[in-house]
């Protein structure tokens, strides 16, 4: 058997190791190239799926930025929940660079805003002269009486009419008994008939409002001039409001929808209705 010199064996071993190293490097390079190609393909697919931040996306974002950056605290409860949900979802898509889904959701929000299903009507600022009217608890000693088919007890602030029944059903809303909403017009009829109003610690405005069929949670008095005044009554849902012009009685009360921007039954003040709408917008749209 022929034996190679030690020098030749060493050279053969070194050559074998070099060939193995070259083969390993080549296999690694091919693998890395394949991985780069696959990553590039996936990136292209993600890009196609997510869309691009084009002019259309930029326009939508510019329209929605003032809405999304402002606090929704003073919006109606329903609109506040919807706006907060949109904020979270849009931020999620923007963070993930998912421009396609951002576009779809942004357009949906814009549609809801234009259709009025989400309202940007806001409660008047706390710095404005907003009033929550009160009427003190009475101790007249007058027992329960019947007024036009309704059982009325003015000391207990109770009546079987639809207004008080509906107020009782709103269990989630804790309204103090001194709130004027607990004084329905049937109670007001008994109070005005048997109680000395001058002895009651209630404002002139409260005594005027108890005669109305409906009461609101808050009121704003707006004096346009020395001889012209407007009273606006509104609830937390920020939809239908009461508008009294010059006098605080049923003959001068008008209903106006903040959501639909229209007068109830198309009955509006005979003079200055356009100016009154401007005043309403001044308080509720900011």
Image: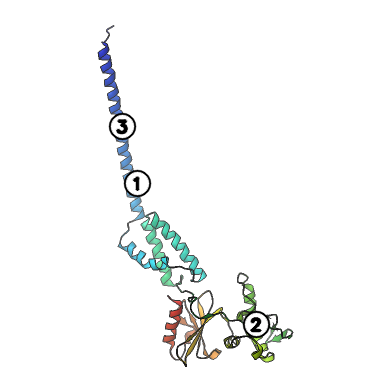
Mark 2 / mark 3, whichever is N-terminal: 3
In this view, the residue farthest toward the bottom is: 227
In the rendered image, residue 238, in percent from the top left (x then y), is placed at: 50, 75
Q: Name the residue located 61 percent from the left edge and 80 percent from the top edge.
A: 181
Q: Which residue is mark 2?
A: 136
Q: Nearer the viewer, residue 118 or 4?
A: 4
Q: How far is disc 2 from disc 1 in space, using C-alphas? A: 72 Å
The crowding category of the residue bearing disc 2, from other C-alpha atoms within 10 Å (few below 14, some 14 to 19, many at least 20), is: some
Q: Secondary structure at mark 3?
A: helix
Q: Is residue 7 above or below residue 204?
A: above
Up-down: is 34 above or below 218? above
Residue at the disc numbered 3 = 27
When asked about the image quadrant of residue 203, the answer is bottom right
Check the image and name the residue furthest to the top: 1
Q: Secondary structure at mark 1?
A: helix
Q: In the image, is residue 84 above or below residue 218?
A: above
Q: How far apart are the alpha carbons under marks 2 and 3?
A: 91 Å
Say which quarter of the image contains residue 56.
bottom left
Question: Pointer 1: what residue?
Answer: 42
The answer to the question of whether label 2 and label 1 lie on touching residues, with beta carbons closer than 8 A, is: no
């Amino acid at each position: 058997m022929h034996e190679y010199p030690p020098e030749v064996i060493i050279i053969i071993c070194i050559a074998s190791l070099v060939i193995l190293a070259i083969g390993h490097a080549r296999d690694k390079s091919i693998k890395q190239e394949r991985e780069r190609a696959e990553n590039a393909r996936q990136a292209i697919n993600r890009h196609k799926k997510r869309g691009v931040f084009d002019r259309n996306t930029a326009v939508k974002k510019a329209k929605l930025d003032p809405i999304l950056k402002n606090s929704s605290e003073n919006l109606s409860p329903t609109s506040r929940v919807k706006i907060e949900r949109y904020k979270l979802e849009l931020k999620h898509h923007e963070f993930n660079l998912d421009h396609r889904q951002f576009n779809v959701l942004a357009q949906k929000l814009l549609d809801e805003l234009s259709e009025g299903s989400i309202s940007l009507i806001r409660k008047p600022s706390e710095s404005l002269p907003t009033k929550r009217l009160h009427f003190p608890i009475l101790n007249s000693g007058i027992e329960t009486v019947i007024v036009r088919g309704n059982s009325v007890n003015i000391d207990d602030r109770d009546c079987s009419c639809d207004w008080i029944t509906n107020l009782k059903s709103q269990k989630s809303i804790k309204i103090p008994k001194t709130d004027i909403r607990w004084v329905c017009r049937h109670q007001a009829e008994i109070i005005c008939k048997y109680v000395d109003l001058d002895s009651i610690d209630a404002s002139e405005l409260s005594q005027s409002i108890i005669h109305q069929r409906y009461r609101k949670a808050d009121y704003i008095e707006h004096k346009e001039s020395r001889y012209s005044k407007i009273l606006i009554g509104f609830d937390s849902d920020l939809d239908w409001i009461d508008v009294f012009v010059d006098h605080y009685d049923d003959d001068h009360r008008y209903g106006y929808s903040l959501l639909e921007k229209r007068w109830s039954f198309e009955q509006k003040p005979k003079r200055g209705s356009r100016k009154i709408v401007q005043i309403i917008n001044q308080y509720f749209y900011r």
